Image (cartoon, rainbow, N blue to C red):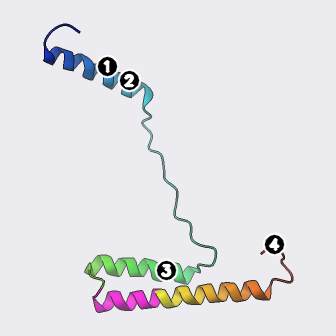
Amino acid sequence: MKGNVNESWALFRRRLLDLQNKYVPKARVQGEKWRKEIWLTHKAVKTIKRKYKVYRKYRDSKHPASMTADKKVHREIKRAKYNFERKLAENIKNDTYA
């Protein structure tokens, strides 16, 4: 590389951009989608989304609305787990793979 610093930098930058255009893909790679747990019910998912919405609105976990939403989510998750395990236990004789 002959010449001054600016010419060398311009040459390096041009080559780098050419290689980037040639080898780096331009399409965005989509990440994995959030998969819910098998025991999580639709109602529980809705309460979780509501909790996030309330928290974004107030930005305070100690706000009464946020605390109420958190309690509802906790109660709904507990209920969903309990119902899933109960149904699994009831169906264990018929479905040995469960």
Among the 4 quarters of the image, the one containing residue 5: top left
Q: Which comes before the other along the chain, label 1 or label 4?
A: 1
CA–CA distance between discs 1 and 3?
A: 51 Å
The local secondary structure at tag 3 comes to helix
CA–CA distance between discs 3 and 4?
A: 29 Å
Of 74 and 42, which appears nearest the observer?
74
The local secondary structure at tag 4 comes to loop
CA–CA distance between discs 2 and 4?
A: 52 Å
Front: mark 2 or 4:
4
**What range of the chain is rendered magenta?**
62-73
Q: Could you tell me the amino acid type at mark 3?
A: Lys
The local secondary structure at tag 1 comes to helix
Magenta highlight on residue 75:
no
Q: Where does the image place residue 28, in percent across and percent down from the top left?
A: 44, 44
Give neighbour class at mark 4: few <14, some 14-19, many 20+ (Cα, 10 Å).
Answer: few
Asked whether the beta carbons under mark 1 and mark 2 sit within 8 Å of each other, the answer is yes
Asked whether the beta carbons under mark 1 and mark 3 sit within 8 Å of each other, the answer is no
Residue 46, numbered label: 3
Name the residue tied to disc 2.
19
Q: Could you tell me the amino acid type at mark 2?
A: Leu
CA–CA distance between discs 1 and 2?
A: 6 Å
Q: Which comes before the other along the chain, label 2 or label 4?
A: 2
Q: Could you tell me the amino acid type at mark 4?
A: Tyr
Name the residue tied to disc 1.
15
CA–CA distance between discs 1 and 4?
A: 58 Å
Give the residue drawn at x 84%, y 76%: 96
Name the residue tied to disc 4.
97
Q: Which comes before the other along the chain, label 3 or label 4?
A: 3
Q: Where does the image place residue 63, in percent across and percent down from the top left?
A: 27, 88
